[in-house]
Each structure stands twice: as C-alpha cells, then as structure tokens.
C-alpha cells in the first residue's frame, strides 16, 4: 500500500469515528432535552405513600437559590445551549487537527483553535449557570470561647501596660515630619528666578557667517533652486538651538510678511530646524510643494509664506533668520531669529 493511500485510509477512519461520536451525542441530547429516557422510575417507588416524608437533614436541608418557575424547562434549554457550544468546540478542535496535519495557513490554525477553546469555555460557563444546582449551604459551628480566666488575663495585660520606647517614637515622628516639611519648603524653589530671559534668546547675531556642519562657508552660489542644506553660525557649529535649514526658492513666489522683503537675497530663505510643536528637527524639504515636514508628528510648514504651519499640531511658524550677502558673496545673518526657536512657553503659544 502506498503512503498516500494509507494516509487517506486513516483520515477516513478518523472521520467515521467522529461521525459516530456525534450521533451518540445527538441521541443523548435528544433524550435529555425531550425528557425521555430508557428507564423510567416512579417517584413513589419503594416508599409508602401514606406515611409522612422524613424531615430533611444535612445537605438535603440546604436552601435552594434557583428562582426559575420551571426548573425542568430551564435545564432543558441549558442543555441545548451547552450542547451547541460543545458542538462548536468539537468542530473547532477537529478543524484545528485537520488544518495542522494539512499544513494550512496560520490564520486557519488560529481561527479553528479559537473556536475550539472559545466553544469549550462557553460550554463550561453555561453549564455552571444553567445546569448546576444553586444552593446556600450552612453548617452549624460550635462556639469556642476562651476560658474566663484566660480572657481576664489578656484584658488586664492589655490595659495595664504602657507604650514602651516613647523616646524612639518621638524621634521617628520628628524625623519624618522634618523631611516632609523640607519637601514642602523645597517646592518654593520653583518660584525663584524666571527662566524666560534665557528662553527669549534668538541665538544668532548680526554678521555671523553661515557655515555647513563641516564648517564650510555658504555662498550665494552654493545651492540650486529647490535644494536645501543645514547651516550653523560660524562660531557655534553643532549647536542644537542654532541649527537652521537654508533653502533656495524662486524669489518671485515668496510671500513674506511686511518688513521681511530683504530677508531672502536671491531666493535664499532660512528657518529654524527646531519644530515649534515639540522641538523635533525639521529637515525634510519637498521641492514640489515648497513644504518643510517634521518627521515626528507630521507638521508641515509653507516655505514661501514664512514657514507658516499648514497641517499638523504645530501652531506657530518656524522662526525665520534674516540674511544678506557680504562683499565676497558669502551669506551672513542679518540678526537673530524672528522669535525664539523651539516649542512655546510662558507668553509664547
């Protein structure tokens, strides 16, 4: 017999066993749900119907908490729900086995396993709520009081003694109170000198030459239209708050605010690379749209309109650096940024 034929035979035998088991479960379910069973036992079998019923004791005396008007109907419906959930579990389990042995996709394995575990879990929960009896069991317990002389001794010992180590307790309370007071007083340190003057620094000063990160001076011929580069003050190469993006655009398309008409010689515009939202470096320039992009939170700034924000969480434009060209054709700063670089702070939204 070939290996493939042998595997097919085992699969056929497995499916036959599953089908027979399913039919047996269905017959059992039908018998329970309809109330028909193979052996019917009379409730009065073995008892004298004229004699009174004995008083319930032990577990038989537990109080029943089931509030259903028809417990038999409740159990039948519970059996139906449990049986359906169990069938789902069986189908999922068999499907998982078939999927596993046939090297199916991972989503098939995961789906069938979820159906199997979910169906079995739902069956257990439903059986606990619908099929298990709900009773309140109470067991009497004898009182076990201590002897009178022992209780009297504990009472006298508790109330006649004094708290020891009072000096240590006072020291503990004093130290803890002192540390707490020092912490509260330390908070007043935050009400000291305002940090605003240092935050208002616009970094650049007039006359500073623009240089690259390698320290190479930038001239009016360094960039082509639509290109950009990161520059620093000549004496502060690498300073984070001084990093500036220099872009060359068509000067005829610039729409700078009033008073900045001479800030962009030959189409060179310079803006702070520190985003006004969270301080991330803004350095992605799209020449087709003339937009600067912040990679952190996707704020965009219009280069032609003084880096005004067009989308994203940033609320303020990027500070602009005034520029001019010296006699040798090198670009220099015409002063500091138009406003302090970086995110907002007191008085700066």
Image (tube, grey):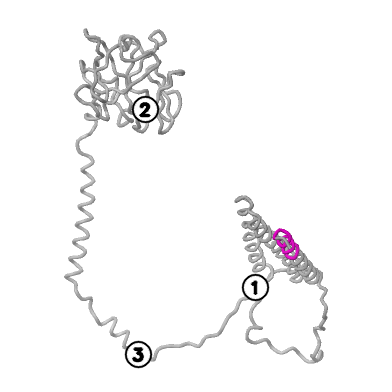
Q: Secondary structure at mark 2?
A: loop
Image point 63% across, 86% down: which residue? 58
Residue labelled with disc 1: 134
Image point 81% across, 88% down: which residue? 45
> How dense is the environment of label 2, judged by Cα within 10 Å: few (below 14), some, or many (20 and up)?
many
Image point 78% across, 70% down: which residue? 24
Instruction: Tell me which label, 1 or 3, sits earlier in the chain.
Output: 1
> In this rendering, which labeled residue sits more in front, label 1 or label 2?
2
Left/right placement of residue 157 relative to residue 307 reads left
Residue labelled with disc 3: 150
Left/right placement of residue 249 relative to residue 65 reads left
Q: Residue furthest front?
A: 1
Figure disc tally: 3
Q: Reply yes or no: does residue 69 show up in magenta.
A: no
Residue labelled with disc 2: 282
Quadrant in which residue 264 is drawn: top left
The mark found on residue 64 in the picture is: none
């Amino acid at each position: 017999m070939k290996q493939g034929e042998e595997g097919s035979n085992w699969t056929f035998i497995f499916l036959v066993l599953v089908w027979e088991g399913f039919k047996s479960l269905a017959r059992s379910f039908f018998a329970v749900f309809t109330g028909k069973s193979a052996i019917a036992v009379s409730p009065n079998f073995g008892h004298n119907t004229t004699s009174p019923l004995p008083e319930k004791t032990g577990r038989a005396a537990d109080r029943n908490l089931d509030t259903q008007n028809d417990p038999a109907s409740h159990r039948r419906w519970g059996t139906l729900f449990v049986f359906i959930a169990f069938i789902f579990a069986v189908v999922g389990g068999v499907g998982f086995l078939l999927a596993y042995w046939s090297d199916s996709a991972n989503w098939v394995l995961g789906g069938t396993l979820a159906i199997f575990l979910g169906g079995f879990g739902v069956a257990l929960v439903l059986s606990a709520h619908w099929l298990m009896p709900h009773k309140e069991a109470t067991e009497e317990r004898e009182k076990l009081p201590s002897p009178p002389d022992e209780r009297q001794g504990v009472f006298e010992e508790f109330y006649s003694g004094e708290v020891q180590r009072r000096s240590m307790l006072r020291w503990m309370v004093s130290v803890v109170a002192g540390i707490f007071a020092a912490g509260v007083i330390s908070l007043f340190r935050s009400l000291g000198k305002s940090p605003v003057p240092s935050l208002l620094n616009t970094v650049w000063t007039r006359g500073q030459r623009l240089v690259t990160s390698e320290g190479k001076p930038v001239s009016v011929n360094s960039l082509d239209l639509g290109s950009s580069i990161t520059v620093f003050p000549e004496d502060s190469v690498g300073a984070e708050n001084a990093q500036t993006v220099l872009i060359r655009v068509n000067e005829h398309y610039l729409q700078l605010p009033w008073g900045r008409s001479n800030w962009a010689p030959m189409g060179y515009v310079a803006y702070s690379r520190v985003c006004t939202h969270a301080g991330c470096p803004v350095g992605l320039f799209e020449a087709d749209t003339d937009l600067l992009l912040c990679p952190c939170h996707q704020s965009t700034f219009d280069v032609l309109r003084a880096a005004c924000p067009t989308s994203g969480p940033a609320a303020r434009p990027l500070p602009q650096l005034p520029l001019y060209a010296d006699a040798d054709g090198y670009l220099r700063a015409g002063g500091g940024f138009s406003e302090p670089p970086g995110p907002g702070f007191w008085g700066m939204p």
